[in-house]
Amino acid sequence: GEDVEQSLFLSVREGDSSVINCTYTDSSSTYLYWYKQEPGAGLQLLTYIFSNMDMKQDQRLTVLLNKKDKHLSLRIADTQTGDSAIYFCAERVGDKIIFGKGTRLHILP
Amino acid sequence: NAGVTQTPKFQVLKTGQSMTLQCAQDMNHNSMYWYRQDPGMGLRLIYYSASEGTTDKGEVPNGYNVSRLNKREFSLRLESAAPSQTSVYFCASSARQGGEKLFFGSGTQLSVL
């Protein structure tokens, strides 16, 4: 079955890079996504990657995909206080999209 | 464009009461989804509808029913609410191209007493 795992918490100093990791189980995933949720708000799509790619860069965001290990990461360069949020990894398998439990990113001054 | 619209935003029910959460999208998307979000559990898929006229169970369908009324609307019904259904509910939709990304509504906060 499908399962998406990610660590629950990450603390990073302002200005450093944040790396949030995710593992998934279903090798037939077609797309993998990163969503951001700020307090009291819905989910906002940050970026996504097609399963036949291994890297995607979008401004401060870099997504790395290791399909062999079923490992996805999101790197946020020059982390700012506005990046404080919960980050969700998700995989698309057929018509379903399954989410991880989310990683809460805490920014230290 | 409004995107994905959910109603109501807040609801309090007593155990055993029924209610329907409404969701509509104006993006001409084929697929629609209902998720619930609980602290420490992330988002869990309740039901989804890959296209008009079809619905399928997700990870946690028990206690819920859905109706894909037309291409725009996908409702979630609680026939006999239980305290375990206290949660934040999100509706989402996606198209079949451009990454098949999910677009979310703003959520419904439901409390069952």
Image (tube, coloured by chain):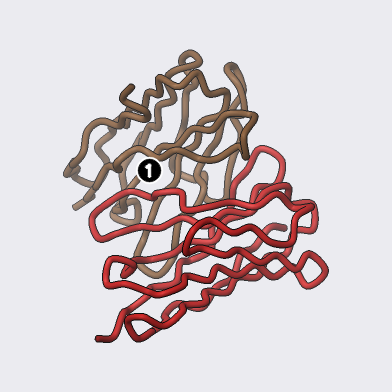
**Residue farthest toward the right in the current orientation of the protein:** A68
Q: Position of residue A81 (x, y in %)?
A: 27, 72
Q: Which of these two is toward me, B21 or A56?
A: A56
- Is A100 on the left-hand or right-hand side of A29? left
Q: Position of residue A98 (x, y in %)?
A: 58, 53
Colour chain B appears in: brown
Disc 1 crowd rating (10 Å Cα; few below 14, some 14-19, many 20+) is: many
Q: How many marks?
A: 1
Q: Residue at x 55, y 35 (%)?
A: B48
Q: Secondary structure at mark 1?
A: strand
Q: Amino acid at mark 1?
A: Phe
Q: Residue at x 53, y 71 (%)?
A: A75
Q: Which of these two is toward me, A80 or B105?
A: A80
Note the chain letter of the red one: A
Instruction: Residue under label 1, please give it.
Output: B90
- Chain bearing tag 1 is B
Quadrant containing the N terminus of chain A is bottom right
